[in-house]
Every structure is written in C-alpha cells, then in structure tokens.
Image (tube, grey):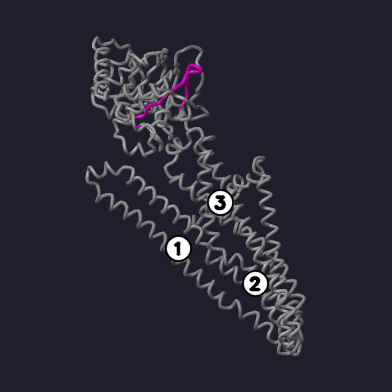
C-alpha cells in the first residue's frame, strides 16, 4: 500500500462510498439519515455563530479596558453569560447529533456488510476463495467502526473549517485592513494582508504535512494487517488448545506467537519513525501559531492605527482562519488511519462481490441446484472443482431413491466431503446439476455439530429454536440417544459446546434428528467420536424411528456398510475422481444389534 498509485486509493474510496452512502438513499433509512444530518449542520452553524459572537465580544471588552470605560466593561460582561450558554448548547447539541449519526450510519453499514457476508453461506465460501483476506469478522466489527466514526468527525471538521475560514477571513479583511511596505522608495500596498498571510501560512504548513505524512497511509494499513494476523493466530491457538496441550506443542506455539508479534512490532516501529517526522512539523507549527499574528499586527498597533480590542480580535480571527485552513495538517494522521480501515472494509466488499460474479471453472459453468420431478435425488453430470479450477470429481451421475441409505466411500482426498458440501449448496464451483425432491426437508450432520450458546432445549431445536415441541418428544429423543442424564438441565443456559464431549455433541445431533424428523439426512463422519456400540445404537435409528428418511453419509469406520443399502465409491484419478455405485446386502445381525444397543442405552439412562 505504501507504493499504491493514487488512482488505486481513489478507487478504494469510491467503492467504499458507493456502499456506505446508501444510508442516505435507502428508502428505509434515508429520512432518518437526512434528519440527523440536518441537525448536525444546524449545530455546526450555531457553533460558528457563537464563535463569531465571542470574537466580537473580545473587541468590545478590550476596547472598553483600553479606554477604562467601566460602563462599557460591565455592558460587555453582561453579554458573556448568554454567549457562554449559547456556545455550550451548540457544542453539546453537535456532540449528541454527531454521535447519533455515527451510531446509525455504522449500524446501517454493519448490517449491510454482515448481512452480505452471512447470506448464502458466503462466510463459508470466502475461506475457499481467498486466503489473503484475514479476519473478516474483525473487519466488520472494528474496521467498519473505524471507517465511519472518524469520517463523520472529519467531515464535520472540514465543513466547520471551510465556513470558519470564510467567516473569519472576512473579519480580518474588515478589521486589519491593508498594510503598506516601502521598498527602495516604492510604497507597496497589500490589501487584507492578514487574510493573505493566514492563507499563505496554512498553505506552507499543509504542504509540509502532506509530504511528511503521505507514507503513513501505507504504514498504517500494513500495521492493521499485521495486527489482524496476530489476533487470528491467537484465536487459532485458543480454538485448538486441547490438541496443542496434548502433544506438548507449547514451545512451537510460543515461537509462532513471538514471530507473529515480531511483525506487529516491526510495523509499529516504522510508524513511530514516521510519526516522529510528522510531530516535528506539527510542533513547529504549534510554536509559531500564536506568534505570527502578533508580529503581523504589532506595527499597526504601535502606529496607533488599531485599538487593543482590534488587536485581540484580529489575533483571534487569524488563529481561527489558520486553524481552519490547516485542518489537513491536524488530521493527516487520522486520515491515514481512516483510509487504512476503508481499504480493509473495501477489500472485504470486493471479495464478497467476487463470490457473486466470479466463476472458477472455465466458461460460465456452475453447479445448478433445483427440484427433481420425482421423489429421488438426482446427481447428473456433476463435476466438482477447487477454487483454482482443479477437478476433484468428474462427471458423476447417480440417482438416490427416497428412503435409501447411501454410504459414500473413497480414499482420503477423493472428494467425499466436497460432494457433501455440494449437496448442501455450499460448494458452487463446478458444473452439472443436483436436484432434490421439492418440499422435502434436509438436515446436515457434520463431524463436529454446531452447538450455539443458549439452553440445551434451544440447542436441540436449533435452527428453529422457537418451534413448539412437547416435552415428551424432547426427553424421549435424549433418552433414545443415551443422554437421559441431561433431562434436568434442559433449560440451563450455558456454553454447551465447551461442556459436552465430542461424543456427547454427536449424540445431541442425532437427538435433533429424532425431534425434527427431516426427510433427507446428510452426514459427514457423524459417528467418529463414538464407540462401536454407541454407533450401532444411533445408526439403528435409520431402521426404526428414522426409517423413512433418505440417508447419505460419509464414513470410514468398519461395519458402516451394514447400515446402508447402497454404496458410492469415489476412485481418485488425475482428471478427477470417478464415481461408481453398487447395492449392499443387509446383514442379518443389523436390526438385532441396533435394537440391543438401543435397549442398553435406555436401561443405562433409567433412574
């Protein structure tokens, strides 16, 4: 980013504003947006008006002091409380309306980007499309805030600076008048010399700040990226804490954390060096700020051309004009930080757009999802590919009849899980079609079932946690899946994903199936954490309570074929895995074992 062309930076800002400014055009939010904006502008105008009033009061007060006019001093003092109250109210109103605008605008942009990210499983597919985009959740939670809050403050500051500069420049023009310089016997008259001096001074300070601060944009962007990577590394460590602890990987993880944080430190050190150069410019300006107007107006005061009150008014007006015109100087660091956040938000938006309009395989082909004309699931001419275009599964065609129990097998890397993702609609990269009977409900059971934070009851009903299910159905499902000991904790709100073991989480997933009774069930290593007897008990559900459901499962454990009547095998080949299917004979012991295991689980859970 440090060497990025200016055109690229403008493009980032243009794309960002194209999304962010919808707050003012969206029919659902535009009236609120324009109402709050009008309030902000009204309080800005009120604040500048009171500033002009205080500036005029300074002249009246100091002129009265110079003349030793007691009545004039008391008269000016009488106006002071009104000016103070007006100033306080305008500033307070501006603070409230500004914060309200920041909150509502951020709410709108966060809702827009997060909704885009979550809808259609983009949060899932994004990880396959790009590896360079780190921490999208942080970009939504933090970078959106950092792209909105400073922007509102800087926009208000810029508007105030423009109006303030114009207003107080007029005061300088009127009060300070012209200056006469005699050079070589020639008298030169400089009209409104104080206003001209204020503009020239601000121009020089702004140019100096621009050239010293320009490198900071790329440095801040790089620093934010390193910070995001460091947070991602720490999150990965926390999420895999048990596995790391079991294999005693502490030393390696400490080294990795240290290396990642070293990059953060290096990025900060580059910023610190550049900040030192910027501070030199800003502090030099700060030292000259109060002195320059005094030096410029002093000759006219000593010559008796202006009063003391006029000197005070001119100095205050010069300072106001100069402060307004060097707004860029005072805010360059914030501009750099703001642009870095804008870049990160726009990168996320760009990748989300890429998910919608990009194609991975050659041509415009993609997997077509639709409804079948009968009760069967039809996979026709299906080819699955990785995001780089490499074919994983080639030209697969199979029909799965309603109520069939299908086992998908094959060596590691042959595309079994990818096929499951395609059935779930999570894998759009490929060609061909997948057609499912219309109106049939589908449940997916991954190897590690998702357990949201909440009560155990809501977890069992997830994702339709608000549906009405009688107590007997829920407790019966728990009993049948070997979780009867959790009856009394159904309404406890806790972090169940952390409390329950891997096997218990998989039992919860089967209990969900018993409660929700889906028409089609797709499982991916759904019994990997269970012992063989527990696996027999739970897979026995597909011979009894769930016998009407169509089952499609992936698994490697021995004995799984006994619970399926059709087997799909994926054979790895250079041009993509080839699919073959065959019927499976039913074991005579299959039903007996499942019923025996179910009875043993029920007895074990009986108080």
| Residue at screen point 43% across, 63% down | 270
User: Which residues lie in the magenta part?
Assistant: 429-448
Q: Nearer the viewer, residue 254 or 510?
A: 510
Q: Find residue 178 and report its horizontal and vertical position in percent.
A: 76, 80
Q: Which residue is mark 2?
A: 322
| Residue at screen point 68% across, 64% down | 47
Q: Find residue 412 and report its horizontal and vertical position in percent.
A: 30, 28
Q: Which residue is mark 3?
A: 8
Q: Earlier in the sequence, mark 1 or mark 3?
A: 3
Q: Viewed as shown, does residue 469 lie left or right of 481?
A: right
Q: Find residue 20 and report its horizontal and vertical position in percent.
A: 60, 47
Residue at the front extreme of this rendering: 607
Q: Main secondary structure of the magenta part?
A: strand
Q: Which corner quadrant of the image does residue 500 belong to? A: top left
Q: CA distance from mark 2 to mark 1?
A: 27 Å
Q: Which corner quadrant of the image does residue 19 belong to? A: top right
Q: Nearer the viewer, residue 228 or 245?
A: 245
Q: Nearer the viewer, mark 1 or mark 3?
A: 1
Label 2 close to label 1 by CB (< 8 Å): no
- Please say whether residue 305 is one of the residues in the magenta stretch: no
Q: Nearer the viewer, mark 2 or mark 1?
A: 2
Q: Viewed as shown, does residue 414 lie left or right of 402?
A: left
């Amino acid at each position: 980013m440090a060497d990025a062309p200016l055109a690229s930076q403008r493009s980032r800002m243009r794309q960002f504003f194209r999304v962010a400014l919808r707050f003012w055009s969206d029919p659902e939010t535009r009236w609120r947006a324009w109402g709050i904006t009008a309030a902000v502008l009204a309080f800005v105008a009120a604040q500048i008006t009171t500033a002009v009033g205080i500036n005029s009061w300074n002249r009246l007060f100091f002129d009265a002091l110079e003349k030793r006019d007691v009545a004039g001093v008391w008269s000016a003092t009488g106006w002071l409380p009104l000016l103070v109250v007006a100033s306080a109210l305008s500033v307070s109103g501006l603070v409230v309306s500004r914060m309200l605008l920041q909150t509502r605008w951020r709410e709108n942009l966060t809702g827009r980007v997060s909704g885009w990210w979550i809808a259609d499983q983009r949060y899932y597919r994004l990880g396959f499309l790009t590896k360079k985009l780190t921490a999208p959740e942080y970009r939504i939670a933090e970078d959106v805030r950092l792209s909105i809050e400073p922007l509102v403050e800087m926009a208000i500051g810029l508007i105030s600076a423009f109006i303030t500069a114009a207003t107080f420049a007029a005061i300088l023009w009127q009060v300070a008048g012209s200056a006469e310089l005699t050079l070589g016997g020639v008298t030169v008259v400089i009209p409104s010399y104080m206003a001209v001096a204020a503009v020239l001074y601000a121009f020089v300070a702004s140019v100096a700040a621009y050239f010293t601060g320009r490198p900071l944009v790329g440095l801040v962007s790089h620093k934010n990226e390193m910070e995001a990577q460091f947070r991602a590394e720490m999150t990965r460590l926390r999420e895999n804490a048990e596995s790391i602890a079991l294999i005693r990987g502490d030393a390696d993880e400490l080294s990795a954390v240290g290396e990642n944080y070293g990059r953060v430190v290096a990025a900060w050190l580059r910023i610190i060096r550049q900040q030192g150069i910027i501070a030199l410019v800003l502090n030099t300006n700060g030292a000259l700020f109060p002195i320059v107007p005094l030096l410029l107006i002093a000759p006219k005061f000593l010559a008796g051309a202006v009063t003391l009150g006029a000197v005070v008014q001119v100095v205050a007006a010069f300072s106001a004009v100069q402060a307004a015109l060097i707004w860029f100087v005072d805010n360059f660091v914030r501009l750099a930080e703001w642009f870095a956040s804008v870049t990160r938000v726009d990168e996320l938006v760009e990748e989300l757009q890429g998910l919608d309009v990009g194609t991975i395989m050659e041509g415009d082909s993609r997997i077509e999802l639709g409804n079948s004309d009968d009760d069967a699931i039809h996979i026709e001419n299906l080819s699955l590919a990785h995001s780089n275009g490499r074919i994983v599964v080639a030209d697969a065609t199979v029909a799965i009849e309603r109520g069939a129990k299908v086992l998908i097998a094959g060596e590691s890397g042959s595309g079994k899980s990818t096929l499951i993702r395609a059935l779930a609609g999570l894998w759009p990269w490929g060609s061909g079609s997948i057609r499912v009977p219309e109106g049939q409900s589908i449940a997916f059971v991954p190897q590690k079932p998702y357990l949201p934070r909440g009560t155990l009851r809501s977890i069992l009903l997830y994702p339709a946690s608000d549906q009405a299910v009688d107590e007997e159905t829920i407790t019966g499902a728990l009993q049948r899946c070997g979780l009867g000991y959790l009856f009394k904790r159904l309404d406890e709100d806790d972090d169940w994903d952390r409390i329950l073991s891997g096997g218990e989480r998989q039992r919860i997933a089967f209990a969900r199936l018993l409660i929700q009774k889906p028409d089609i069930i797709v499982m991916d290593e759904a019994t990997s954490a269970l012992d063989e007897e527990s696996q027999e008990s739970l897979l026995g559900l597909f011979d009894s309570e769930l016998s009407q459901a169509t089952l499609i499962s992936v698994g490697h454990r021995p004995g799984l074929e006994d619970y399926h009547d059709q087997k799909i095998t994926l054979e790895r080949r250079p041009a993509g895995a080839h699919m073959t299917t065959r019927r499976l004979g039913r074991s005579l012991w299959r039903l007996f074992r499942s019923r025996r295991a179910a009875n043993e689980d029920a007895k074990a859970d009986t108080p």
